[in-house]
């Protein structure tokens, strides 16, 4: 796939599967994306969908804090992260559970994070994923720095940086992309344009006709992709990764998708968008496209499909249990991780808390 | 008279003042159609139209920066920062310009704007949503910083802020957004800026608090009252300029003081209050002043968050300590 | 002039006078830019050049603080500000002395500012110019806000916002331009690309081939102009103003010029650029172009030219004297302008300073 | 041993440490070819190449933000912010990330970086070039903030900072960049972080200062020595974490204290020091503590700037006042 063929100013967009799972861009399908691999990625989408539903269930039951669902953004999550290789970094925003899972972050940890424990960001040593980032857009320059480091070390790796349509308005996004252009850092700016930043629609976010064209400002390519099309997302991200990996510099990808759920569990989207709009979008389910394609190829039977969902439901439940069991409630944790060595005033404050809790008869050792 | 919570009281103040002052413009993320993530601006866009209640792109620095321009152009902008945790993105504009414009132009240009932001912990919100960095703002010359602790004061202080000729940061303790209901009159009244309020009288010890900590201070005073300790509780209401006269007058009477805040301890506003007391009422002090504060740590995520916030229990311990000194 | 004819991505640039003062873009010359007006603007350039030289002289003599010269940027200064009309706002960065003078800021005030007195920013009531802005790029959103205010009031005015090539890298610049696109504020983003941000060359500032193309990111036109060509700058800015004034939204102008002098009087450019580079640029003097043109038109005699410089030298000297005489040294000023009403703690600090000064036997009333 | 000024001492520290630690990268505006506007990084790009001494685009948030990424990627970045007045543009990254990364990842990710910035008034620089907002940084949990006052300490503290596993903000009092020359050894030595230094002993009063104010404090001590007052002067050197033990030990001896800083008074670090003394040595205090500080105003432009800064005269007045109390 040649990125240059997809000038956003000419209105071009990468598409491979249509909404009915028909192949409309056969020549764009990457050679390494075999049907077997596709089945594997479909698995990942199912895993994400189930994990997302479970999070909502737990949130409603008071077992989890505020949570931002990924419903509708599975193709953008999975298709992009799937192209990464060993040594590559992934820099999430906060709506990339699927991408994080794919890169080896245990679901239990992600749950722990949204359940309200910092231990949820204590990823395994070998996992090259940064923590979830709450302040919109601030993680983008971290990704550029990681890519810069990789370039200086001649690692040949890429860094995949996620953010939303809203984040493109932040100065951080601009400064980071500009640095990436100047220092030709091997990274991919992957924008999940889900059409909303909480209540603010994409049309209020910027007067630019597309987000992809923003890359013009930084002297590197920007490309639009059907963000609900797993294959298209994969193809575009892979092309971008190839360019970055070979020293060709960064690429901006605008994955056009739609947030089917609320912004977070604290949000009420009925206040700012019409039920009809959402209904109309629901038919464009990223999982459905892949499923239809796989069925047409005879790669998926109803029985296998049912089994798959059952399997992930069980797995996800187990991870949820693991998360709840693993959260330490040790108040020492509040103090112990600000510096490599606890300074005296924090030791004093920690001791104070112990005394307070002891006075209340509360255990202080977790 | 209607009993309102703080969200409703602020909403009412905005509605009334926008009706009579056409120069007011609200702008920020999600303030319009959604009515704000806490619904503080609920219904205002429907009433005043999208030119006066404006949903902006996601960019705090530009929200404050364009507000500066709007103010210079004759409007009274009321930008909302969705959470105080995202105020740092606008701090450069606040430090370099909002707080300075009058001085650097020797009064030629003034910035009558009110920056609103919910602040503080205690609602089990995600990371970066529990900040209380009001001391940073209080350190900046040229700013006024207001923090109401009740619905009545919220309305009156906001009306005063909206009429103030200088820039005001109006911090709303979101933990008690809906926790307290009280009678809030319709129509015009103001609570003057830069005046603290004695919310409970006593002669044994002075407890100074603001925002959601006032409630904890009052509860602590009630706790120790049972033990015969009469604590006087002062609600600062405006933290900059600081009404140290009211604090010092009380300390002269009680000789003892406890300062309560949820922000980090080191270089928090509590230190400044201790310094002022020390400078102005040294000889009245019968015991060391005590601080009951948030720890010098990041506010923990929700599982440990409750350990972070000072509460009536901790405040009462400090009261007993200074009284027994 | 049609802005759409000058797509920066196609490498097009607005040019009218060449370096020898020959007309190369006759059809672009605006109708209202008569020879008489041109003479008048040439006057303004001379005024600026002389005022700039005087500032350097005073700085060297210790009569002024650090000062950023405008040498070489006279066409960009004058050609742009000249299109403004009554009611329009001008938002300077810090290298727009000529533009500020043109819009009615007294030279004595500008001198007072650089001499180190805040009174230098106390402009006359009827002058719609914002104070000089030291933190790079932070003034841009102020300009957008002013334009927004004008739009809401249906004033039909425009706001002309200046900044440098370096400023385009700041997040502030991005956020402000994005707001301008979204709210279609009537403003002109006028970038004086003088090729350097202190020591950092334009090529390190961004990987974008041109700065003008950055406007693509915001959905409004960007145009390149020969920034040393007074007529071209005028034509482009006027076209932009016409568009903005008529509700067509903002325009970005990249005026390509060259900073002939040091960044400020504290700078030593020999550390980062070659003498030859500067020498080569010196022939491209914006004043010379206009002078050659005027001479060719028989509009300028050597005698008139000499008289003109003499006149401005006298005027500038008088303003410099006025500035020095007018600077108040009243320490009360340190306190009296932070709030409309002096708060008690500042009154106390002011009193303290009075006592200190009295103790030293220093007068405290200016 | 060579007599160096602070600029040269910092340059030497960078040069030596970059030679032995290949992970160090300097980045910022004009740090490379120009060697920094104050020449602190002079010659380093020629020595270490443009990959290790990097001129960046003009964007403070990205300078710090990419430094975070570089640190996570195994480097030790040393970003320079050209003037502290422009640090607010990077404050969002500092507040939201630099100071938090270790804690939010429970130690999984750490940020060993050193942010350098010249700070303070007194060089007759333009607007926004005279700021000293160190108290804001000291209020942030997870940061260390170092301020040298001599060339020797500057080198030793910077070496310590460069080897510290946690993020350090290294503020350089530019007013005395070239004012003091002293012997600075070549080669390795460190001055430990978080340890204040008694720079002059005395038993009548404790004077606490940092940065360019140390010199004023010492001069004031010399002035009052002629009157028979023995002032002890403490140079904080690190303001966060604060070495209050050294301060309190001195106050226990002297019973009196003066705190000197050029930053604005209200909510400055002076308030915190007063609070700590009050909390830890209340009964030792024989007189109210005094603050000699910058005013609660914007630093005036050069014509009035000298009125702003505390000097030996003001400090000596305060010393006499507390001694005579
Ligand atoms: C700097 C900052 N401002 C405001 C917020 C509050 N907030 C959280 S998510 C969000 C919208 C983000 O929109 P977008 O970038 O499109 O991502 P999405 O949520 O759609 O995935 C806002 C305003 C924040 N987290 N950070
Ligand atoms: C935010 C900020 N960072 C750094 C500086 C220091 N500084 C002053 S001017 C300048 C370069 C500006 O370059 P440019 O925008 O091209 O304008 P020019 O000076 O060339 O007119 C720098 C880095 C500053 N004033 N503001
Ligand atoms: Mg979105
Ligand atoms: Mg420039």
Image (tube, coloured by chain):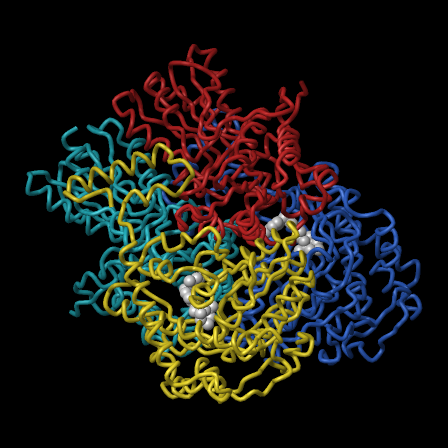
Chain colours: A blue, B red, C yellow, D cyan
Above or below A147: residue C291: below
Q: In which quarter of the image is the N terminus of chain C?
A: bottom right
**Which residue is found at the position 14% from the left and 30% from the top?**
D324
Of D162 and B129, nearer the camera is B129
Question: x, y percentage for residue B242?
Answer: 40, 32
Question: x, y percentage for residue A34?
Answer: 81, 74
Above or below C320: residue A183: below
Above or below A325: residue D182: below
Of A252 and C165, nearer the camera is C165
Question: x, y percentage for residue B233?
Answer: 45, 20
Residue A256 image-quadrant placement: bottom right
Say whether residue B224 is visible: yes
Q: Classify residue B49 as left or right of residue B207.
A: right
Of D104 and A186, nearer the camera is A186
Of B220 and B211, nearer the camera is B211
**Which residue is found at the position 58% from the left and 59% from the top?**
C176
Residue B300 image-quadrant placement: top right
**Which residue is found at the position 67% from the left and 38% from the top?**
B41
Q: Classify residue D259 as left or right of residue A131.
A: left
Q: Classify residue B301 as left or right of residue D30.
A: right
Say whether residue A142 is visible: no
Question: x, y percentage for residue D204?
Answer: 13, 36
């Amino acid at each position: 796939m040649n990125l240059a063929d997809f000038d956003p100013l000419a209105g071009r967009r990468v598409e491979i599967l249509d909404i009915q799972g028909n192949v409309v861009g056969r020549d764009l399908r990457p050679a390494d994306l075999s049907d077997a691999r596709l089945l594997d990625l479909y698995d990942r989408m199912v895993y994400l969908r189930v994990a997302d539903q479970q999070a909502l269930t737990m949130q409603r039951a008071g077992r989890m804090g505020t949570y931002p669902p990924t419903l509708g953004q599975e193709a953008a999550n999975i298709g992009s992260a799937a192209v990464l290789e060993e040594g590559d970094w992934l820099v999430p925003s906060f709506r990339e559970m699927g991408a994080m899972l794919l890169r080896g972050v245990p679901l239990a940890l992600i749950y722990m994070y949204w359940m309200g424990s910092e231990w949820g960001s204590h990823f395994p040593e070998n996992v090259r994923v940064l923590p979830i980032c709450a302040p919109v857009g601030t993680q983008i320059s971290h990704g550029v720095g990681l890519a810069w480091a990789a370039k200086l070390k001649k690692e040949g790796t890429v860094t995949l940086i996620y953010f939303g349509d809203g984040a493109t308005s932040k100065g951080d996004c601009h400064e980071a992309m500009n640095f990436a252009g100047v220092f030709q850092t091997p990274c991919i700016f992957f924008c999940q344009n889900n059409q909303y930043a909480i209540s603010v629609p994409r049309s209020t976010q910027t007067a630019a006709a597309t987000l992809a064209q923003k890359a013009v400002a930084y002297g590197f390519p920007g490309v639009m992709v059907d963000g609900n099309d797993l294959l298209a997302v994969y193809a575009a991200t892979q092309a971008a990764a190839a360019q970055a990996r070979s020293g060709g510099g960064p690429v901006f990808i605008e994955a056009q998708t739609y947030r089917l759920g609320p912004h977070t569990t604290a949000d009420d989207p009925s206040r700012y968008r019409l039920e009809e709009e959402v209904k109309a979008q629901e038919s464009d389910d990223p999982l459905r496209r892949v499923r239809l394609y796989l069925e047409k190829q005879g790669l998926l039977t109803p029985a296998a499909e049912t089994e798959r969902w059952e399997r992930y439901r069980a797995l996800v439940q187990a991870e949820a249990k693991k998360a709840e069991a693993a959260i330490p409630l040790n108040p020492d944790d509040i103090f112990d991780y600000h510096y490599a060595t606890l300074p005296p005033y924090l030791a004093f404050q920690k001791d104070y808390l112990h005394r307070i809790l002891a006075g209340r008869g509360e255990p202080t050792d977790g | 008279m209607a009993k309102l919570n703080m969200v409703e009281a602020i909403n009412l103040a905005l509605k009334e003042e926008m009706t009579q002052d056409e120069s007011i413009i609200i702008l920020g993320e999600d303030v319009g159609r959604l009515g704000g993530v806490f619904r503080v601006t609920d219904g205002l866009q429907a009433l005043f139209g999208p030119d006066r209640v404006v949903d902006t792109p996601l960019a705090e620095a530009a929200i404050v920066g364009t507000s500066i321009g709007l103010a210079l152009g004759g409007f009274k902008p009321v930008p909302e920062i969705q959470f105080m945790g995202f105020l740092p993105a606008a701090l450069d504009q606040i430090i370099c310009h909002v707080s300075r414009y009058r001085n650097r132009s020797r009064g030629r240009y003034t910035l009558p704007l009110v920056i609103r932001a919910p602040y503080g912990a205690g609602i089990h919100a995600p990371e970066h949503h529990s900040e209380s960095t009001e001391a940073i703002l209080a350190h900046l010359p040229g700013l006024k910083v207001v923090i109401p602790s009740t619905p009545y004061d919220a309305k009156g202080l906001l009306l005063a802020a909206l009429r103030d000729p200088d820039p005001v940061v109006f911090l709303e303790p979101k933990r008690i957004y809906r926790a307290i209901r009280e009678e809030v009159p319709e129509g015009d009244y103001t609570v003057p800026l830069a005046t603290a309020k004695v919310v409970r009288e006593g002669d044994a010890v002075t407890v100074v608090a603001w925002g959601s900590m006032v409630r904890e201070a009052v509860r602590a005073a009630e706790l120790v009252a049972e033990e015969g300790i009469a604590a006087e509780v002062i609600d600062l209401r405006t933290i900059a300029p600081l009404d140290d006269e009211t604090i010092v007058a009380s300390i002269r009477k009680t000789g003892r003081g406890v300062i309560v805040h949820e922000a980090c301890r080191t270089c928090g506003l509590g230190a400044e209050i201790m310094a002022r007391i020390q400078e102005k009422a040294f000889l009245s002090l019968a015991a060391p002043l005590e601080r009951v504060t948030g720890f010098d740590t990041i506010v923990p995520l929700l599982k440990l968050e409750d350990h972070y916030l000072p509460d009536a229990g901790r405040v009462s311990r400090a009261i007993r300590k200074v009284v027994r000194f």
